[in-house]
Image: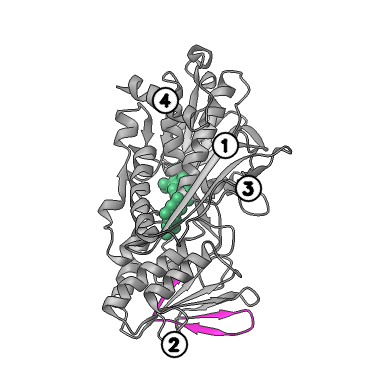
Amino acid sequence: MIDDARRRFLRTLAAAGLAPLSACRLSRHAAGKARVVVVGGGFGGATFAKTLRFLDPDLRIALIEPKNAYMTCPGSNWLFAGQSTPTALQVDYQALSQRYNIDVVQDRAKYIDSSRRRLHLAGGTDLAYDRLLLAPGIAFDWEAIAGYDVNAAARFPHAWQAGPQTQLLLRQMQAMPDGGVLLIAAPPDPYRCPPGPYERASMMAHWLKRHKPRSKILILDPKRSFSKQALFEAGWRRHYGYGTAHSLIEWHSLADNPIVRLDAAGKTVVTEFGDRFSGHVLNIIPPQTAGRLAVESGLTDASGWCPVLPATSQSPLDPFIHVIGDAAQLAPIPKSAFAANSAAKTCALAVTALLNDREPGEAGWLNICYSLVAPDHGISIAGVYRLDSSGRIAAVPGAGGVSDSHLPDAAEREALYAKNAYRSLIADSFG
Ligand SMILES: Cc1cc2nc3c(=O)[nH]c(=O)nc-3n(C[C@H](O)[C@H](O)[C@H](O)COP(=O)(O)OP(=O)(O)OC[C@H]3O[C@@H](n4cnc5c(N)ncnc54)[C@H](O)[C@@H]3O)c2cc1C
């Protein structure tokens, strides 16, 4: 079964221009029983492990992930509109371990001993590696907003890592009085899922419109503009009275006067120049960095994210460590699950080439981010990326762009595509 699936998968990669077929015809034995250890079972790590198995059946692949089930952030905003359930957003690692022969280790990576190429786990074991792939996602900068730390997040959820935080925010929204204010403090760039805060506001507005129509969602933004802004605002005008006195959503740019403090007792955020914004529910999404292991291992730079050599995702600080997903700096590619899945495939091809002493092939990346403005109103942004002549990642001119809202039924069709794209991405990454 795996051989058939492998052949189909390699043909798909080749057809997508991500892998010339010649590059996929590996000398399996050159890599022998090399060991690749993957940290993080999110979209980046899971897709990488699965792709590597397709590319080389002989490799020993271990995937380290503390959770036995993973709740996807994609689709988690849909909970607020009653369009999904926590159970529907759960995936597990059964397919990776049983169908793809990946050694899934339920543990947390604690420390990288790069001189001996060993990864130490919190449970006490340590694993030797020939290549280490880090896809630990994000961590939060708890210093950025005074008073907003990990304890405060238990009362004022960020819900930016799907799970209990998302469900807490959902309960708080549902319990809010009609006429209440729900405040979303959006994060500064770069952060996980650029359209995410605005899709969240849309999904919440859809629910509030039916159940608490006198309420208001206030988005406080440290940016001057945001992803798919024109499409979101057109959708908000159509569905939620945006721009009128009765609008369910208000967006305020605080680019010159950002939030610096939380007054927890007063359920109020305070800006640099002392402006105060209060809400019944506060969804504070703090600034982000690469996941803690990457930071503590010294693989990040002053930006808080991991620099990488784009063609192979190798850390410039250690050529045996590759970083992908949200943790890596791959700008202008946004930090999304779709992009993590795409980068994982490109990186798996590079790692198999390096293990076989071959030059990695030409690197390429794709991203498509769908958002729902209402359950039957979708919008999207897409990008195709290659290396330019100076070796930097660049968007391919003329490829991608935003969805065309002028086409008949565009909103309904994009909503359908959004739901189908979610299912395909889950199957491709974990299934
Ligand atoms: C509300 C919201 C909506 C979103 N919607 C979309 C969308 O519609 N489409 C889209 O493409 N993207 C979306 N995203 C973005 C997407 O979730 C992320 O870009 C994606 O999850 C990044 O994948 P990753 O593998 O880098 O990190 P993650 O998916 O976060 O996975 C990281 C994994 O690493 C594990 N880990 C961390 N540290 C360690 C350690 N020390 N040892 C072992 N394991 C560790 C974690 O437990 C976690 O499972 C959304 C995000 C949010 C917040």
Q: Is residue 60 above or below residue 335?
A: above
Query: Do the CB atoms of the residues marked 2 and 1 lie less than 8 Å apart?
Result: no
Give the side of residue 314 with respect to residue 137, left or right.
Answer: right
Figure label count: 4
The alpha-carbon separation of the residues under discs 2 and 3 comes to: 45 Å
Callout 2: CB less than 8 Å from ligand 1: no
Please tell me which residue is depicted at 60% across the width and 47% down the height of the picture.
398
Mark positioned earlier in the residue sequence (2 or 4): 4
Displayed quadrant of residue 393: top right
Identity, as a three-letter code, of the amino acid under mark 1? Gly
Residue stretch in magenta:
268-284
Identity, as a three-letter code, of the amino acid under mark 3? Thr
Identity, as a three-letter code, of the amino acid under mark 2? Ala
How many neighbours does mark 2 have within 10 angstroms: few (below 14), some (14-19), or many (20 or more)? few
> Residue 300's mark?
3
Identity, as a three-letter code, of the amino acid under mark 4? Phe
Query: Is label 2 or label 3 in front?
Result: 2
Displayed quadrant of residue 40: top left
The alpha-carbon separation of the residues under discs 1 and 4 comes to: 19 Å
Whether residue 384 is visible to the viewer of this picture, yes or no, is yes
- SS at circle 4: helix
Please tell me which residue is depicted at 31% across the width and 52% down the height of the picture.
89
The alpha-carbon separation of the residues under discs 2 and 4 comes to: 56 Å
